[in-house]
Image: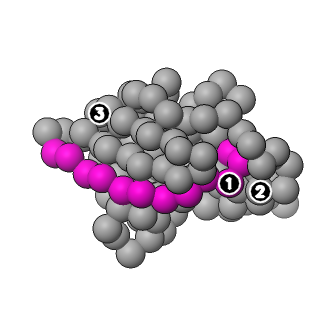
Amino acid sequence: MTRALPSRRAILSGLTAFALFAAPACAQSVSGVYRAEGRNPDGSSYSGTVQIQDNDGAVEMQWRIAGQSYSGSGSRNGDVIWVNWGQTHPVVYVRMPSGELHGTWGNGRALERLIP
C-alpha cells in the first residue's frame, strides 16, 4: 500500500497552527530587507527583494519583483504574518528559527521564501 505525501497547503496549515499556539506573543521583529525567492501559481519562478516594517505587530511590506513593485499591510501574531496585498487571498508567512519567512499566496497555489 502506498501513502500519499501531504500537500504544501497541509504542511503550511500545520506550521501555521503550531506557530499560533506555540509562539510567544512578543516574537522578534521581522523588520528589514529580505531576498525573495518564489514560485507562481503556474509553476514559474521569480526573485526580488522585500522591505518589511514591523511596528509592534502591524506589518507593512514592499516587494520589488521582476521590475514591478507591490505593497501590502497586515499583522503579525507571534511567528505568523498575514499580509493583504490587493488580491483575494493574503500572503501568509511563518517565521522559521533561521529568521527566514516561508509563505504561501494565491490560495495556497504559490510559495515564497524571504531570506534576511
First-in-chain label (3 vs 1): 3
Can residue 105 be seen here? The reply is no
Where is mark 3, residue-wise? 48
What's the magenta region? 68-79
**Quarter of the figure that contains the N terminus:** bottom right
Q: Residue furthest front?
A: 56
Residue at the spot 56% in from the left edge and 35% down from the top edge: 30
First-in-chain label (2 vs 3): 2
First-in-chain label (2 vs 1): 2
Q: Position of residue 50 (x, y in %)?
A: 36, 36
The number of discs equals 3
Contact between labelled residues 1 and 2, with CB atoms less than 8 Å apart: yes
Q: Position of residue 27 (x, y in %)?
A: 72, 39
Where is mark 2, residue-wise? 20
Label 2, label 3: how many angstroms apart (C-alpha)?
28 Å
SS at badge 2: helix
